[in-house]
Amino acid sequence: MSEARAQASRVGQRNRDWYIDKAVEIIVFIGGISAIIFIVGIFVFITKEGLGFLADTFDFKEFFFSPNWRPTSEANPTYGILALMAGTASVTGLAMLVAIPFSLGAAIYVAEFATGKTREALKVLVELLAAIPSVVWGFIGLSIMNPLIIDLFNVPIGLTVLNAGIILGLMAAPIMTSIAEDALKAVPDRYREAAEAMGATRWQVIFKVVLPAAKNGLLGAVLLGVGRGFGETMAVLMATGHAINIPTSVFDSVRALTATIAAELGETANGSDHYQALFTIGIFLFIITFLINLSADLIVRGVRKG
Amino acid sequence: MDSGSGMAISTTDLNLWYGTFQALFDVNLEVKPGIITAMIGPSGCGKSTFLRSVNRINERLGYVRITGEINVYDRNIYGEDVELVQVRKQVGMVFQRPNPLPISIRDNVLFGYQIHGQGKTASKSDQDDVVEDALRQVLLWDQVKDRLNAKATGLSLEQQQKLCIARLLPVKPRVLLMDEPCSALDPKGTEAVEELLWELRGKYSILIVTHNMAQARRASDECIFMLLGKVVEHTETETMFVTPKFEETENYIEGRYG
């Protein structure tokens, strides 16, 4: 009898394992929701800093449609980001023209052709390429690409849309390669087997079966590259020439939204109109990149479900 | 080309290795044209391996090595002058799990037709005829004729498997290989596919691998029993199931091992 009672009381006891289990559960939960807390925190912070400008000086028409960014003018400061948007868009656009063929080609090679050690080595190298700091890329743009472009095209200045677009394209290509390769690998092997058994060649399998089946994932990869292009700061600051200008050719210097914040924020008075205007640009960038990444994510998820 | 033995498939001293593992030992087989031949045997006996080497789809693995000959209508498909694409055009393959491509039903039927060049010059109405003819042959036309542009992956498993057979037909193969085509299907689907096999019998030489003894008995003219990479017995189906020559065959058929 007493044996049974002892057994029963032991069942009711909470031992060490129970506490460890609970503690781990709580720690993992905090880790899990921290991303949400941080992103909400960042959004609240930049909104708070930019709010004064948004409420008082902000003029929707001037902000989005005026090419004049003259925040330091004594008499009549204007805050138009049209030229900056054009700068960011032109550099990102050119970067995608560079990055899409590179990354797609690399992804197809790694996912469909390379085997064994070649494949592993390439994957590591691609990831290594993605880890190069952006200031190093900026330095390459400034000291290698700049004189190269001046010599090659006989133009007065090499810090242009072309320079920044190529640099940014090379920067975005590794991450796009990684994602595109995942998308290609996610195509079930039985599709390839089916097509090959019918006598399709390697290229026919890739172009008629694998790429169409992976198209959502590939689109997601491109969108993430675009997001990367919008958000990139340091390399763009160093390679664009940082001149406010709506470009008419790839040999024009431009200035990007991100670079403007980076270059000017340190020189503004805390809380001034200029300071708050820069934060408003920050809100704008935040919303754009958020939307791009969100749609990329939704598109990639779509392909997993389907 | 048909001046030789006239066999649909004949092999001489076929040995096959996966890396260092030997999966087939001196296989000498003759599969007659125009009939259904079933291959039975326990898991790992090499029947799927044999089937897959007749379409040369085994080579995808990259570490497969073969000695001996496999002749399809008296032509060694491993010969040096043979083009892989032509082998696969002549020898169609149906897989265990239905694997229609994630494109429309119509495009699935036209896939092989187009990659083999015939589809490029064909007009739309010619293509329509090809699609209808192939789908009618597999008894699928009436079920899908109103949704030819729907995704093939949305069909039932039975319909998918029939479609996988249908898409082989437009390039006019002479041999159809089927690797347990009914193992993913329910009894009704199995019955429907077996019925289809009888429909196709005569027009094509069919070699079917099955785990299902009853299916082999119902749906084949001749039967090959394999064990541990070797052919044990090859006779008419009726003979094998009533009076098997070897003890191994008898034990397997009666379910003493599997």
Image (cartoon, grey):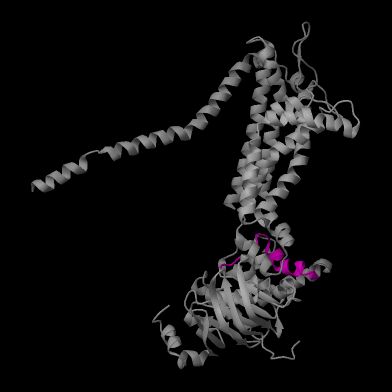
Residue A232 visible here = no
Task: Inspect the magenta stretch and tell me whether residue A159 lies in it.
Answer: no
Residue B84 versus residue B225 in the image, above or below: above
Task: Inspect the magenta stretch and tell me whether residue B108 lies in it.
Answer: yes
- In the picture, residue B120 is in which quadrant? bottom right
Residue B143, position as x, y percentages in the image:
63, 69
All told, the count of numbered labels is 0
Is B194 placed left or right of B75 in the picture? left
Indicate the quadrant containing the N terminus of chain B: top left, top right, bottom left or bottom right.
Answer: bottom right
Range of magenta residues: B97-118
Of B95 and B153, nearer the camera is B95
- In the picture, residue A281 is in which quadrant? top right
Indicate the quadrant containing the C terminus of chain B: top left, top right, bottom left or bottom right.
Answer: bottom left
Could you tell me which residue is drawn at 63 percent across and 36 percent down?
A131
- In the picture, residue B31 is in which quadrant? bottom right
Could you tell me which residue is drawn at 62 percent across and 87 percent down?
B30
Residue at the farthest top position: A75
Residue B207, position as x, y percentages in the image:
60, 81
Residue A127, position as x, y percentages in the image:
62, 42
Residue A206 versus residue B249 in the image, above or below: above
Of A1 and B151, nearer the camera is A1
